[in-house]
Image: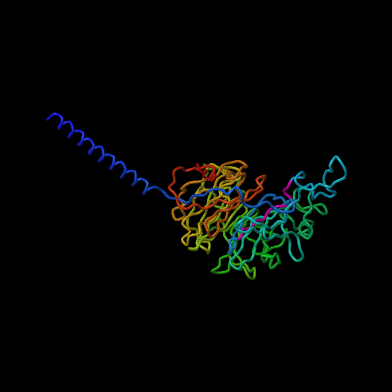
Amino acid sequence: MTRNLRLGSIFLGTLAALGVGSVVLDHMAAVKAAAVMAPRFEVDPMWPKPLPNHWLLGNVIGVGVDSNDHIWIVHRQGSLEAMENYAAANPPGPKRQMGVVEAECCEPAPPVLEFDEAGNLIGHWGGPGEGYDWPETNHGIFIDYKGNVWIGGNGRPRPGQAPAAGAGRGAARGGAAPGGAAPEGQPAPGYYNDNMVLKFTQAGKFLMQIGKPGQSKGSNDLENLKGAAKMYVDPKSNELYVADGYGNHRVIVFDAETGKYKRHWGAYGNKPDDANLGRYNPEAPPAQQFRNPVHCAELSNDGLLYVCDRPNDRIQVFKPDGTFVKEIIIAKNTLGDGSVWDIAFSKDPQQKYMYLADGSNEKVYIILRETMEILTSFGDGGRQPGQFYAVHSIASDSKGNIFTTETYRGQRIQKFLYKGLAPVTKKDQGVVWPKTKG
């Protein structure tokens, strides 16, 4: 009898344990099912393949993806240091101790480079040419739905440096320049060279220029830009949106075929002005104008324009006519270069997710676009694959992969492979290195 009672107790206890375990497992399954999901990425440390001809990249200041999933970048040849440029020196760089042999390495790659999906360099061109004004310092690249390549610039010569040949010298010599005349061949105080955007074919044939070097009259000038940071062409209307940018404080819209002015606006849809707002203060009320630079203008499939107000640490969202919709503040206490550098969207038709490059905090945020909620982020400061030194520009391809570029001494492009949706386990993932087998 006692033995039967003992066995019965054990049996009942086992059932109870199984019941509790089942409840726990059910709860864990429910929690997992309810977990926040977000796109997951891993860096591809072998992309792109090495460049030919001992070519090097300078500040990589723009990235775009065309309809064939070819990846385009624009970089600054002049940002390379002297010791990176020995083969391009005139006369050539240091000779070897034994014998008179010119330096074999290295020299700047052409400004515009085109890669295929595998990371092979398949095209290159760019630089000054007949009929157009190449920027002092190029900035931003966009490949529109027709395959045209757009390039901006944000250069203004350093004190004592003459404007580039053909780059609006007249404005730097006469009394029309702000602050009066300058010595012959030198820019006047306030001179800003890159007041234009350029349009080319994918083979590098020049098609159109909007704006003239050194001619900007400020944020309400309808003919010239002033430090254009990034461009976007709407395939529905064939309108060109420009984040304008480093000298001006606005978004401006042109006809992408004729270059004719359409409209422009500043923060909150206000008429822009060029009053000095002083340094960004995270404790102050939101600025009613953009600060420099207005760094991106990206149109979503559902007709919303997302604008990077970089030093103000915010994205502002507008209708195509300039009507303000909403804003989000990112890493509010970020000073200096600001937190909102560039954005790209996921490639599902709804563009459910938005990817934000933050070159100050060295990460990429993954944001739920509808609510503007930050789901997670990846990246960290450093020079190894998956790390960033001033992550500047971002784009995505049709497979969901992300491409990022780095300015300053970062000088590279990286590819992050899309690995599907996964539960968010950490707000900041850090370096998304490939998973090792074992």
Q: Residue 139 occupies which quadrant of the picture?
A: bottom right
Residue 195 falls left or right of residue 368? right
Residue 405 falls left or right of residue 372? right
**Among all residues in the image, which is located at the extreme right?**
99
76 drawn magenta: yes
**Among all residues in the image, which is located at the extreme top?**
2
Region of the chain picked out in magenta, as a range: 70-80
**Among all residues in the image, which is located at the extreme bottom?**
258
Location of residue 217 in the rendering, given as x and y in whole percent from the top left corner: 68, 59
Task: In the rendered view, tell whether residue 151 sits above or below residue 108.
Answer: below
Task: In the rendered view, tell whether residue 3 sits above or below residue 389.
Answer: above
Q: Residue 200 occupies which quadrant of the picture?
A: bottom right
Which of 30 and 3 lies nearest the eye of the viewer? 3
Which of 58 and 244 lies nearest the eye of the viewer? 58
Location of residue 313 in the rendering, given as x and y in whole percent from the top left corner: 54, 47
Q: Is residue 292 visible?
A: no
Q: Residue at x 69, y 55 (%)?
A: 138
Location of residue 133 in the rendering, given as x and y in whole percent from the top left corner: 73, 61
